[in-house]
Amino acid sequence: MDSNIVTLIEQSNKYNSSKTNFFKTKLFVSNNHSPNREYSKQVAQTETVQYNRYQSKEMNSGRNSKKISFNTYLLNLAKQNIDMFPKVKCDFANIQMVDLQDNRFRVFPKELYEMKKAQIINLNSNFIKVLPEDLFDNFPSIINFSISNNLVVILPRNLSHWSAHLEILELSKNRIQKLYPLITLINLRSLFIQSNEFQYIPIELQNLKKLNELGLDWFKYLNPPIDPIVNRPYIEKLFSSLEEKQIKDVEDPSQINFSDEEYSSSIGMNFQDFLIQFSNLQLNILPNPQGGDKEYSTTILHKAAVEQDIGALISLISYYPEIVDCQDQRQNTALGLAIQEEKYFSAKALIFNGASVNTNAAKYGSILNLAIVKGQIHLILDILTQGADPNQMDEKGNTALHYCMACFDKDVSIYKQAFMALLKKNVNTNALNQDGWSPLHIAAKKGNTDAISAVIQHNSKNQSKFDLNLKGGKKRQTPLHLACSNGHFEIVTLLLQQSEVKLFSRNMLNQTASQCCLHNYRIYKLIKRYEYEQLYRLQKNSQLQDQDDYSVKDNDSYTDLDESIQLFDGLQLKQIKINRSVLGCRERATGCKFRFSSQPPQK
């Protein structure tokens, strides 16, 4: 038998439905098991096929493929990081438990249809968006179906095909917007629907008379809050409330058409009614000036954003719009907190349901700055679309472009998109923060070569340009000074290739760029070559115009200059005359003789 097909023995107790993970099986691996071996009843309870993704190629290769014919009970492919069902030649006829959790499936694997006897299917933590219609025409013995933490939006109507046998249904942490198809599952004993996007509970949910366990996130927002997974007493209270609402809202209950989903939603229980009905104390919707949850918030809107309970979140905004931009003790709005905690769906719901995108975001200064730090490109684009100010500063004067340049090396593709989006919104390209640094200075200091390339590409195509010679910081340094002093060779090369870059610009210490890189032999060689090329052209054309830029003011950097240039470039230097009005009398004072070749240096 292939080494990646192993027998796992000893099954634990039956799944406890009050927990979220369906397979509580402690599995022990046995590599020497024979299909015909008899197990004692106390030890062997199940036989399992386990797939090893690192050996799948061996298993699937032509004649070496093997068919497993002995009876199996549990197919365990959990945590394999696979997005397609492996091509395992195996008899799945007797499989009763399937574990595919923590993988990367984007569609429901049709290979499972071969497992006619499957009773438990676990697809938690994948990326499935759609449940196929034919899914519910299969698995006639299904008892337990779990697909939590996926992206499911719609429950198909033919879910009713499982009504005769389905007992446990796990749908939490999806994007389900309507619960109406659930009303036909009359044999359900456990239902988990917390953290979805529905905003009402249909009155027909009271048809689930056998329901003993319900997971509903709305219970967390009561006063006092209770655990979102409740038992029979709370379920009976919910059903009683649904029945009362039905009688109250409809004059003639006998005329209700229970098949009409839209009519049902109009008289179903919404989030506000639920809070009023089940809370024992008065609700604290508005911020509490005395403080609140130390970790998160002073409003339940912050809590809904962090928990990513989208249905509750949208309902709260709808009923209490005045709290949408309230800040917690850390000066975070619900939107800022959602982005900070990386709750993408909560943030998106807030952006498109009235939350301001120009409010403060604690130390980051703005919602946009925070989104850039988190690298959420879709949120960045949404925030800009909703009118965010790209020039809004944090407490240290940094704009969104400062943050973008600082983070560029984290993910070039994401931050290049953010960079282009900011430029389209007329961001100030040369804004200085409180330390005197522009976005370009930040990129040069950090050595973000891709950011510098993006700047140069922008300058070549647009009129609104980055100033490549802008001086910043206490030492009044240009980007070239910073790149040289920090040893960023590639950035120095890029800047030197730009004709507008001033090689002889001096900082507050009266240093040129070449004097800032004496510790880096490679950069010093490169920048000296460009200096002498430029000086040669200026001398030849008699176009020395700025004496300050080209006068020699630091003798140390020019000591043994002839020897250094011969070492770097192997040039045969010939003495030429240099305009004394430019060089002053430094040659006589220092004893240094400045020489230039009669031909431009060769690279």
Image: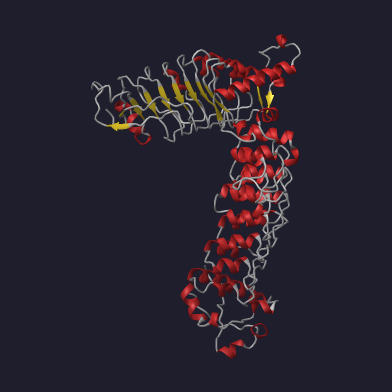
Q: How far across and how far down the image is residue 475, in percent?
A: 63, 72
421 to 488, vertically: above or below: above
Across the whole image, how many numbered discs are drawn on residues?
Answer: 0
> Is residue 553 visible in the rendered structure shown here?
yes
Q: In front: 531, or 88? A: 88
Q: Quadrant of residue 55?
A: top left
462 to 268, vertically: above or below: below
> Is residue 3 visible in the rendered structure shown here?
no
Q: How far across and how far down the image is residue 463, in percent?
A: 73, 56
Looking at the figure, which quarter contains the N terminus? top left
Q: Residue furthest front?
A: 280
Q: In front: 278, or 419? A: 278
Q: In front: 173, or 499? A: 173
Q: How far across and how far down the image is residue 240, in percent?
A: 64, 19
Color theme of the render: secondary structure
Q: Quadrant of residue 467?
A: bottom right
Q: How far across and how far down the image is residue 2, in percent?
A: 28, 30
Q: Please give the name of the residue rendered at 58% of the width and 23% of the height, measured from the top-left corner.
A: 235
246 to 477, vertically: above or below: above
Q: Is residue 443 left or right of residue 115?
A: right
Q: Residue furthest top?
A: 254
